[in-house]
Amino acid sequence: KQFVYNPFSILLLCEEERFSNYWFATATPSFLIDLIKEKQYYDFDGLKVGEAFFEAFQISKDIPTGALLFQTGYLTVKKYDSKTRLYTLGYPNREVKESMLEYLLGAFAKLEPGFGNEPVQNARRALQTEDFELLKNTLNRILYNLPHQLYEDKERVYHLLIHIFFDYIGIDLHSDEVNTARGRADVLVELEDKVYAMEFKIDQSVEEALKQIKERGYLDKYRSSGKKLIALGINFSTEKREVEEFAEEVVKSV
């Protein structure tokens, strides 16, 4: 199997004599970002598609976002299952994924490109050290800029923005992998020594969020892992445009 690299990135590597993210060095993919904002869906990594997906050649407002991302090189085929005849798509490399997520954060929350290093490091440190005040302040830095009056479905936009941010900081998200008969956590983060199940509420009670995590068994899969299990309830205030309240609880392991 052969994977295609971006020759422009290689040329800049040779010219600059240093590794860097050169993917979006020539232009901002504004038409793609606008389309993703309109659809309010971003999680294309691991997207499974059939043969008909590759026949969408006509670029118009009705073209599936995933098809346009594939045609323009932001997604590539990662594997093919001959039994189901399904293709699994994903970002070609970390450079492309990080660039796309950074531009999405900037587009949704009106942040300038390149904003990310400090919030990323703060969020990672907060999760590793269980510094929830730092995590709260970091998330609020993102949310303060959210032009919420532009979005009718505020809850979906808040969830979307936080998902993009956690994906962007490069931690392991397992929300899609841990489904129970009673639902799934908004965000499930696995670190070397601990696992977080996060439930977001909008103008509601964080206690209700903790109750939901425990009753629906979002952390049950990890009870025998030997890791510390932490339920984290987060309530967003749409009026204040910030994380208003945190509540955490350690869930007993087996």
Image (cartoon, grey):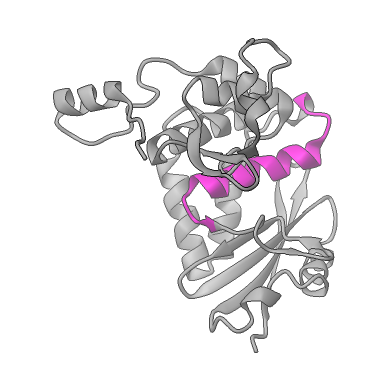
Snapshot quadrant of residue 222: bottom right
- Where residue 4 appears, as percent x and y from the top left, is 35, 30
Snapshot quadrant of residue 5: top left
Along the horizontal axis of the image, is 125 left or right of 246? left
User: Is residue 20 positioned above or below 234 on the image?
Assistant: above
Q: What stretch is highlighted in magenta?
A: 150-172
Q: Which of 30 and 97 is in front in this view?
A: 97
Dominant SS of magenta comes to helix
Along the horizontal axis of the image, is 13 left or right of 137? left
- Where residue 142 appears, as percent x and y from the top left, is 59, 40
Based on the picture, tell me whether residue 151 belongs to the magenta stretch: yes
- Where residue 151 appears, as percent x and y from the top left, is 78, 28
Q: Nearer the viewer, residue 59 or 145?
A: 59
Along the horizontal axis of the image, is 159 left or right of 109? right
Residue furthest to the bottom in view is: 254
- Where residue 211 appears, as percent x and y from the top left, is 82, 71
